[in-house]
Image (tube, rainbow, N blue to C red):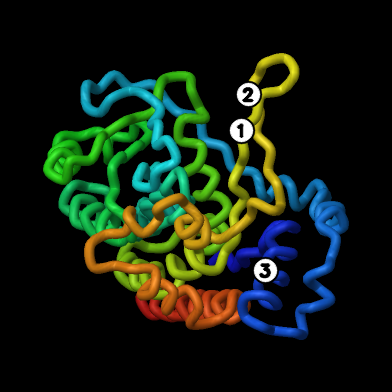
């Protein structure tokens, strides 16, 4: 079993130390909150580290008349999610679990679910749960051209919920880059690449809902790029440390943010989840729960093997 740990980037480490001091009042982090980001970057420039961190998947061309082939345009509004599937390997002809990873384009709010198979009987119920898990109304659903999403059942579900269905364009590998990058930085860092038998899908999905998703959304800072035009008139992106925040903080920072929340939700309710524990406590909870999960998987594997 791959025992990878979710090691934050240099700026994320600095941001977490600042949040520990300023948000959660942990004065022992006062010195670490002043640490230089450039020094942390220097420590993370080694060739072995950068090789492990990279994750690329090219979009394949498929001619299926379901979903509109275009890039979504959320215009600063949450609710336009990018979705992708991560397969947890095969072993001796046995399929591993599948992780369904959905990320909101504007806030980077993320929901990870795990299923035994990606057939319709398994995928449709998990998609319904996934769409319900976002604190705001989902307005757009963007996938690559995989058949697990490009089919009539998924299209009917999205049409019933009045959700726009778009899919990646041919030879445009960046169309679903946000979901694919989160596959590497979140899903693979937590679950690794080793085979996990499909019979453990329900146990893993419970871990996702109780531990992983709250950690990622309320305690894991992300970069949010700013687009600008350079001297040659080309659009560029810059990633300012000052704009780094958790997905929940990003949601709260949007103009009129309260209006985006689903009926019955408020930021007062969500604050109770966000500030129930510090970032470090949430990370420690994640690692202990992950170790317990992998230990249980190994033990059952040995018994059945």
Asked whether residue 305 appears in the rendered view, the answer is: no
**Does 302 sit left or right of 244 as displayed?**
left
The picture places residue 143, in percent across and down from the top left corner, at: 35, 37
Residue 113 marker? none
Work out whether 275 lies above or below 2: below
In primary-sequence order, the first of circles 3 and 2 is 3
Query: Residue at the location (53% across, 63% down)?
Result: 190
The picture places residue 206, in percent across and down from the top left corner, at: 34, 72
Find residue 142 and report its image quarter: top left
Q: Considering the numbered disc 3 on the image, is that residue within a helix, a strand or a loop?
A: helix
Pointer 1: what residue? 227
Query: Residue at the location (32% across, 55% down)?
Result: 259
Measured Cα–Cα span from mark 3 to mark 2 = 30 Å
Q: Considering the numbered disc 1 on the image, is that residue within a helix, a strand or a loop?
A: strand
Residue 235 marker? 2
Pointer 3: what residue? 16
In primary-sequence order, the first of circles 1 and 3 is 3
Measured Cα–Cα span from mark 1 to mark 2 = 7 Å
Of discs 1 and 3, which sits in the foreground?
Answer: 1
Work out whether 99 lies above or below 230: below
The picture places residue 189, in percent across and down from the top left corner, at: 57, 59
In this rendered view, identify the residue nearer to me: 32 or 153. Answer: 32
The picture places residue 267, in percent across and down from the top left corner, at: 39, 68
Q: Considering the numbered disc 2 on the image, is that residue within a helix, a strand or a loop?
A: strand
């Amino acid at each position: 079993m791959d025992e990878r740990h979710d090691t934050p980037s240099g700026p994320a480490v600095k941001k977490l130390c600042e949040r520990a001091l300023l948000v959660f009042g942990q004065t022992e982090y006062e010195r670490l909150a002043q640490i230089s980001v450039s020094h942390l970057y220097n420590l993370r420039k080694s060739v072995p580290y950068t090789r492990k961190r990279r994750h690329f998947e090219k979009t394949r061309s498929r001619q299926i008349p379901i979903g509109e082939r275009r890039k979504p345009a959320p215009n600063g509004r949450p609710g336009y999610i990018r979705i992708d599937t991560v397969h947890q390997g095969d072993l001796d002809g046995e399929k591993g679990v599948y992780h369904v990873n959905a990320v909101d384009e504007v806030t980077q709010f993320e929901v990870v679910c795990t299923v035994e198979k990606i057939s319709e009987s398994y995928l449709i119920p998990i998609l319904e749960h996934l769409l319900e898990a976002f604190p705001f109304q989902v307005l757009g659903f963007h996938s690559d051209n995989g058949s697990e999403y490009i089919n009539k059942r998924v299209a009917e579900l999205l049409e019933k919920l009045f959700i726009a269905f778009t899919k990646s364009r041919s030879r445009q590998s960046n169309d679903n880059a946000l979901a694919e990058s989160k596959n590497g930085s979140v899903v693979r860092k937590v679950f690794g690449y080793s085979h996990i038998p499909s019979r453990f899908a329900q146990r893993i999905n419970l871990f996702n809902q109780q531990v992983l998703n709250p950690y990622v959304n309320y305690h894991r800072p992300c970069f949010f790029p700013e687009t600008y035009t350079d001297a040659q008139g080309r659009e560029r992106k810059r990633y300012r440390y000052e704009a780094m925040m958790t997905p929940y903080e990003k949601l709260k920072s949007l103009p009129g943010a309260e209006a985006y929340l689903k009926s019955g939700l408020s930021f007062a309710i969500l604050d109770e989840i966000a500030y129930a524990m510090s970032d470090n406590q949430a990370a420690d909870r994640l690692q202990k729960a992950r170790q317990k999960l992998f230990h249980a998987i190994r033990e059952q594997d040995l018994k059945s093997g």
